Amino acid sequence: MTQLDARPLAGDSAGGSPDGTRGVRTKGLGGNSVGLMGSAVIGISTVAPVYCLTSTLGSTAGEVGLQMPAVFLAGFLPMLLVAFAYRELNRVMPDCGTSFTWTVKAFGPRVGWMCGWGLVIATIIVLSNLAGVATSFFWLLAGEITGSESIAALDGNKAVHIVTVLILIAAATAISYRGMTATKGVQYALVGLQLLVLGVFIAMALSKAGEFETSLSFSMEWLNPFAVQSFAAFTAGLSLSIFMYWGWDACLTANEETTGSDRTPGRAALIAMVVLVGSYLATGVAAQMAVGSGDKGLGLANPDTSDNVFAALAGPVMGPGLGILLFVAVLASAAASLQTTFIPVARTVLAMSAYEALPPSYARVNPRFKTPGRATVVAGIATGVFYTVMTLVSEHVLIDTIYALGLMICFYYSITAFACAWYFRRELTRSARDLVFKGLFPVVGGLLLAAVFAKTLYDMWDPAYGSGSAVFGVGSVFVIGVGLLLLGVIIMLVMQRRSPAFFRGEILTRDTPSLVVKD
């Protein structure tokens, strides 16, 4: 017989807040489904390192030139500091709502709701881009295998491209609906394949350094962020770099389904971050040594190839035989991430619904698969609609939505970091550890991301930001980013009328007793 017991979760003892309660509710998800390694794989898979590299290597090089590796390091720093905030919050509140739940308890329902919205809409944006990149590489790979240029060119047919994207989204939605354990072995294989092929590319790129007209010799100046030509260029590159690390927090949104939910997800997130920064630095340095970061020929910043670098470099760097492996790796990266990226959006929506911040129907968990079925399906539909509309509106949708995504990421990560310091404010003087990990690191990480958010918001008003397209004279990146945040405000106001108890602070507060399952 299973019943609900209102009491603190494990880990909520002396290390918690003075009230001793955290407001964590059970939601019916399948517990103990994922271990440390599986959780780290979820984080790496959601980030999709090979997909991120092919999508943003060129754009980042175009913004900061040879300082691209330095910007990768600069983007890693705030992410690492915020990861400590997530770890500390998860230790006392292992709730699948993560940023939403934590910021509600720290700052109240409205700030928490918008933080949750930032996470949801960021995930929808990246899901659409994942499907778009997977589609492009699917047709490119089909063309390589068949030797038919006409098949490879099908990706340029807008109708074929959109239909293929929608099919991939539908397939990923169906897989995610069945739960995380359904494809655990496949995820291990796909992540392993990505990292293996990336290692081969790095080795071959280093061996080809000096063979191309644009090849360069390595310089330590590449690791100097102060050598970037302007602060605007630096923040633009940093926004792209931050996007490249986004997704590690999927480890945390799966916390209610993870063995040792209060500690394992935080450790997994840190493991994923270390793997990612190592991969990005090695790839960035090797690619620059091989082909340079200029805008001519094979240069990474060439506008004709910058939105899909590996498609241009596969043959020249790895040869026609091994080059196909790079196509396979990008397709595998995007496909794997397309499935795991449903984890944060579906579970955040589930938590928001469980705490009455969204309609109650989204709190339904499939009794067989123990997954947020309705939330997963709605996320899939929203992703398909978003990608279709944006593709029909703008030819530069991939680049502009990635730039807008950086804004969303800075928005909800920074709020979560500040929430950590505020939530634990009474504990910061207990020990040096509490001061550093619950206060100093989160605040510094939050300030860095907030600064990037503010500067990016200012810069993106200019139509030259991103792809260079504009809407009524305003940069399309600004329109996409700010428009989506304002849409969140409108939906929040609607929900405030439908669910006044949550917005009055009656459902989830710092003092709300936890609800856990007791067998």
Image (spheres, rainbow, N blue to C red):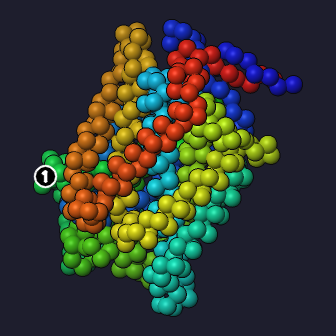
Which residue is found at the position 36% from the left and 10% from the top?
A: 429
Q: Is residue 488 visible?
A: yes
Which residue is found at the position 52% from the left and 32% from the top?
A: 496
User: As drawn, is 310 to the left or to the right of 496?
Assistant: left
Q: Is residue 322 above or below residue 179?
A: below
User: As drawn, is 495 to the left or to the right of 230?
Assistant: right
Q: Secondary structure at mark 1?
A: loop
User: As drawn, is 447 to the left or to the right of 412?
Assistant: left
User: As drawn, is 85 to the left or to the right of 1?
Assistant: left
What's the amino acid at mark 1?
A: Ser
Q: Is residue 255 visible?
A: no
Name the residue furthest right.
Answer: 1
Q: Position of residue 171 (x, y in %)?
A: 65, 64
Q: Is residue 391 above or below residue 88?
A: below
Q: Which residue is mark 1?
A: 230
Q: Nearer the viewer, residue 88 or 446?
A: 446
Which residue is found at the position 29% from the left and 63% from the top?
A: 471
Q: Position of residue 109 (x, y in %)?
A: 49, 27
Q: Nearer the viewer, residue 504 or 256?
A: 504
Which residue is found at the position 63% from the left and 60% from the top?
A: 172
Q: Is residue 135 above or below residue 83?
A: below
Q: Quadrant of the N terminus?
A: top right
Q: Position of residue 85 (x, y in %)?
A: 43, 29
> Residue 313, located in which quarter of the rendered image?
bottom left
Q: Position of residue 271 (x, y in %)?
A: 48, 41
Q: Nearer the viewer, residue 301 or 413?
A: 413
Q: Quadrant of the C terminus?
A: top right
